[in-house]
Image (cartoon, grey):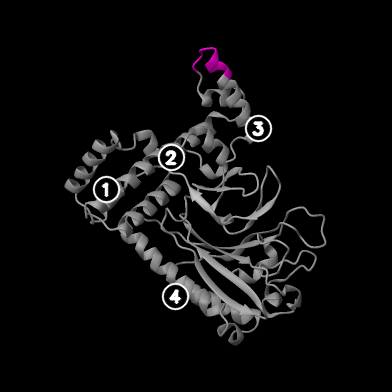
């Protein structure tokens, strides 16, 4: 998990990968700062941290539960925090079960990271092989709701044998006094309900999953536009575009090339490349792909396809080609051809899934989700 500390009041927050690099506001002192100095905590997760991180409870509810637990402990009564959550109606049994599944996954993942370090030190594996196995592990948990040990993944991938795995496990047991156990049957089956129904989509740390930010930049009328592509550990590939306010942004014409494509509602300046008063405006393009990974070889093939996608965007959005590709119809055709031909996958849709202006110009200041029909230009059905 990623964490960040407010430079003004030193208040600490958990931060999702998509907000790294943006300007955020501290909830305590209400001062704004850029989310740049992000750090990680590799400590064993606990249920209360997860409940708060995945919005199962509020900060006030957590403080109330901890206060009750402290009072009970002083009276000599052994009470689990999860029992307090249930008794007070803060979460329901279904949510608690989901949190336990995530908690078990994170605990096993910490052990598997140590497993990987030992394997690298012994010369059995490379750093890349370990990171690929961790990526496959995260994808399997996301899709099937159970955790496979990376030792099993690596054996199935043909890069490690059983004797090497057992040697590493014995070394890990000697160092930590704990041996990773295989998931039990209930864990293998996973919760019947999708975690997405109750919590935010589970997104593991981008660095941890060995997914790199792919940055393409180009200059247009003194305006720097950054297009970042992040392959998240899901069955979809998300591409988001974030604006970087140039020094002379007032001199940028609203009738520019990209403006003609994306601006559909002048009241809210609806298009991802509009220069706003904040750096947190984002637009998401979602490429729906039905992909699944069982070993690191499959994930490597996905990386190659992702690289072709990056190349596809570079063909459309760079200083040379954007002058050659003119008009909505021409770009629509170009994107369709590149996505379906070069990616070699069945892409059913390319569309804007979310766009929220945190400070819409000439509005009442409230966040406004924009109907994605305004971006029907990107639909490829």
Q: Residue 266 vs residue 235: left or right?
A: right
User: How far from the left and from the top, in percent, is residue 19?
Assistant: 59, 55
Image quadrant of residue 211?
bottom left
**Which quarter shows the C terminus?**
bottom right
Return the residue at label 4.
342
Asked if disc 1 and disc 4 are in contact, CB closer than 8 Å, the reply is no
Q: Residue 180 vs residue 366: left or right?
A: left
Check residue 118 in the rendering and tell me which mark sits there, or answer none. Answer: 1
User: How far from the left and from the top, in percent, is residue 30?
Assistant: 71, 47
Q: What is the magenta range?
A: 71-78
Return the residue at label 3.
60
Residue sitting farthest toward the left: 163
Question: Compared with residue 310, is residue 163 higher up or lower down, i.e. above or below?
Answer: above
| Disc 2 residue crowd, few under 14, some 14–19, many 20+, Cα 10 Å | few
Which comes before the other along the chain, label 1 or label 4?
Answer: 1
Q: Residue 251 vs residue 298: left or right?
A: right
Is 215 magenta? The answer is no
- Which element is circle 2 on? loop
Q: Residue at x 59, y 87 (%)?
A: 324
Asked if disc 1 and disc 3 are in contact, CB closer than 8 Å, the reply is no
Residue sitting farthest toward the bottom: 324
- Which element is circle 1 on? helix
Instruction: Confirm whether residue 294 shows in the render.
Output: no
Q: Residue at x 36, y 65 (%)?
A: 301
Check residue 43 in the rendering and tell me which mark sits there, or answer none. Answer: 2
Residue sitting farthest toward the top: 75
User: How far apart in space, not on screen, are marks 2 and 3 (Cα)?
Assistant: 24 Å
Which comes before the other along the chain, label 2 or label 3?
Answer: 2
């Amino acid at each position: 998990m990623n964490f960040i500390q407010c430079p003004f009041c030193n208040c600490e927050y958990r931060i999702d990968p998509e907000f790294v690099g943006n300007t955020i506001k501290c909830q305590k002192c209400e001062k704004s700062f850029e989310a740049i100095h992000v750090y990680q905590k590799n400590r064993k997760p606990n249920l209360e941290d997860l409940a708060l991180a995945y919005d199962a409870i509020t900060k006030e509810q957590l403080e109330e539960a901890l206060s009750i637990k402290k009072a009970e402990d002083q009276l000599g009564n052994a009470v689990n925090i999860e029992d307090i959550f249930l008794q007070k109606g803060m979460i329901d049994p279904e949510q608690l079960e989901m949190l336990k599944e995530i908690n078990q996954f994170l605990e096993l993942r910490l052990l598997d990271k140590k497993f990987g370090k030992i394997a690298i030190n012994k010369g059995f594996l490379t750093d890349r092989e370990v990171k690929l196995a961790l990526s496959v592990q995260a994808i399997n948990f996301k899709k099937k709701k159970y955790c496979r040990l990376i030792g099993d993944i690596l054996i199935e991938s043909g890069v490690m044998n059983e004797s090497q795995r057992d040697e590493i496990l014995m070394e890990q047991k000697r160092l930590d006094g704990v041996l990773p156990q295989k998931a039990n049957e209930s864990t293998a089956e996973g919760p019947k309900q999708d975690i997405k129904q109750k919590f935010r989509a589970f997104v593991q740390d981008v660095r941890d999953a060995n997914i790199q930010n792919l940055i393409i930049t180009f200059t247009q009328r003194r305006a720097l536009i950054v297009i970042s592509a992040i392959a998240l550990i899901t069955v979809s590939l998300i591409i988001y575009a974030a604006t970087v306010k140039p020094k002379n942004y007032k001199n940028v014409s609203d009738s520019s090339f990209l403006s003609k494509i994306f601006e559909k509602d002048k009241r809210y300046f609806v298009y991802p490349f509009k220069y706003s008063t904040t750096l947190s405006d984002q637009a998401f393009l979602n490429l729906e792909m039905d992909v699944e990974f069982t070993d690191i070889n499959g994930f490597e093939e996905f990386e190659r396809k992702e690289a072709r996608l990056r190349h596809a965007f570079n063909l459309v959005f760079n200083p040379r080609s954007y002058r050659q590709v003119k008009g909505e119809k021409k770009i629509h055709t170009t994107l369709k051809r590149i996505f379906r031909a070069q990616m070699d996958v069945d892409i059913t849709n390319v569309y804007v899934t979310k766009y929220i202006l945190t400070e819409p110009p000439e509005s009442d200041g409230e966040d406004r989700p924009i109907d994605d029909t305004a971006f029907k230009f990107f639909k490829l059905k």
